[in-house]
Amino acid sequence: MEPTSKLPHVGTTIFTVMSALAQEYNAINLSQGFPDFSPDGTLLELCAKAMKNGPHQYGPMPGHPMLRKKISETIKEKYGYSLNHDTEITVTAGATQAIFTAISAFVHPGDEVLYFVPAYDCYEPAITLNGGIPIPIALSDNDFTPDWDKVAQTVNEKTRMIIINNPHNPCSSILDEFHMRKLDAILEKHENLVVLSDEVYEHICFHPKGHQSIWKYKHLSERGIQVCSFGKTLHATGWKIGYCAAKENLMKEFRKVHQFNVFCVNHPLQDALAHYLEKTPDFHKISDMYIKKRDYFLSLMKHTSFRFHECLGSYFILADYSEISDEPDTEFCKRLTIEFGVAAIPLSVFYHDKRDLKKIRFCFAKKEDTLMHAAERLMKITS
Ligand SMILES: Cc1ncc(COP(=O)(O)O)c(C=O)c1O
C-alpha cells in the first residue's frame, strides 16, 4: 500500500544532499549551518558530570526550573522585559520543535500564515501539516527586508500568524527598529494575529544597536512567541536544545501541544546548561567572534569574482556568482563541490518557487584554517 503523502512535494533536504556530496568529494563543507569547533570546555565538563551523576530520569514538562530562570534573567538583562519562568518559558528539543509546536498550537485548519521568502525550510511544512495555508511574501532582492505595505495589504481576517526570522537565515539581514515598529503597528491593528519570532541567531547580530527582539515592542511582546536555540548560541547544534518564550496565555496553549509531542527535553543536558548559564557567559563575545570570522572570510575572498551581500547577523553570508557563471544555482553548487572542493547552499532552495537569483550561501562558523583552505580553493574559480 502506498500511503497518501501529507507532504507530497517534500524530498530529502538540500542540506542532507550537499553534506553527502561534500563528504563524497572530500569537500570543505560551508553548506550546512554548524560550527566546526567545539563548545566551551567548562560546559562539556558540566555535561560529563551530569551524565555521570544524573539527573537521568524525566525532567519537569516545561523544562529544568533553574535553566528557565536563567533564560528569563537573560531576557531581562538583554531586552529589559520580565517573564515569569514558571509560566512563560518552556525548554524545547531545539528551535525546530518549538516552531512546530507553536504552529500546531495556534494555527487552525484554513488559517493563513504569512512568512517571508527566502525562508528557513521548516516553516512551510509545519503550516501545511496543521491544515494552515502558507502565504509566502518575498523579501526585497537587494537588502532582503520585508515590504510592510505589502504585508499590511495581505493580512486579512483569516490571517492567524506572521513568522519572522531575525537575524535571517539564509540572507543575514536583520529587522532593525524601523522594521520592528512597522510590524508592531500591524499587530496593533489586528487583534487575532500572533507573531512567531524565530530568533535563533539573537546573539549573532552585528548591528551597532544590537538585536531587536520582540520583547522591546509593545504589541509584539504581548502576542509574540519567541523561539531560540542553544545549539546556535553555544556551538552545539547537535544537542538540539532550545526554548520558547511567550506570555502566559500563549504559553498555556503552547504547553498543551509540547507535553504530547515531546513532553520533556534531555534532562542531564538541561542540568549542565543551567549550571553553565549560572556563571553567565558573556553573550556579546559571540557576536565579536563571528564578526572576526565574517571579516576574515571576506578579506580572503576579496580577490574572487563573488560579490557578497551585507551580513548583519547570523553566521551565513550570501554571495552573488553572476560574474562567474550563468548556471542555475543548484548546478553551480554541485560543480563547486565536485570540481573545486567547497560545498555551499543554493539560495533558490529557500524560495517556494525555487527562483534563481544566482546567489549561494556560505556558512562561516568555521575555524580560520577551514576558511583559509576554502578560500584558497574558491580563488581558483575563474569561470
Ligand atoms: C532560522 C533557523 N531557525 C531554526 C533553526 C533550527 O534550530 P535548532 O537546530 O535549534 O532546531 C535553524 C537551524 O539552522 C535556523 O537557521
Image: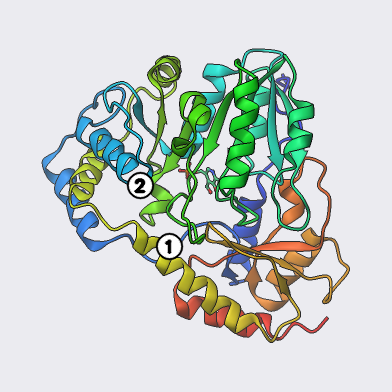
Residue 36 or residue 324, whichever sits in front: 324
Q: Is residue 87 above or below residue 339?
A: above
In the image, residue 235 lies at what x, y percent? 39, 57
Residue at (69, 16) in percent of width and height: 111
Image coordinates for residue 19, horizontal then vertical, percent: 59, 59
Of circles 1 and 2, which is in front?
2
User: Mark 2: which amino acid?
Assistant: Lys
Above/below status of 39 relative to 25: above
- Pointer 2: what residue? 78
* Amino acid type, mark 1: Ser
Task: Kindly identify the residue that appears in the image at 67 percent across and 51 percent down.
Answer: 14
The location of residue 345, given as percent across then percent down, is 67, 59
Left or right: 348 with respect to 126? right
**Quarter where residue 39 is shown:** bottom left
Please name the residue shown 46% across and 34% down the image.
Answer: 226
Disc 1 residue lies near ligand 1 with CB under 8 A = no
Looking at the image, is 78 positioned above or below residue 123? Answer: below
SS class of the residue under badge 1? Answer: helix
Residue, far left: 53
Q: Residues within 10 Å of mark 1 (few under 14, many from 20)?
A: many
Question: Which residue is found at the position 58% from the left and 32% from the top?
Answer: 184
Q: Secondary structure at mark 2?
A: helix
How far across and how far down the image is residue 170, in percent? 63, 53
Disc on res. 287: 1
| For residue 37, above or below residue 265 | below
In the rendered view of the protein, which quadrant contains the N terminus? top right
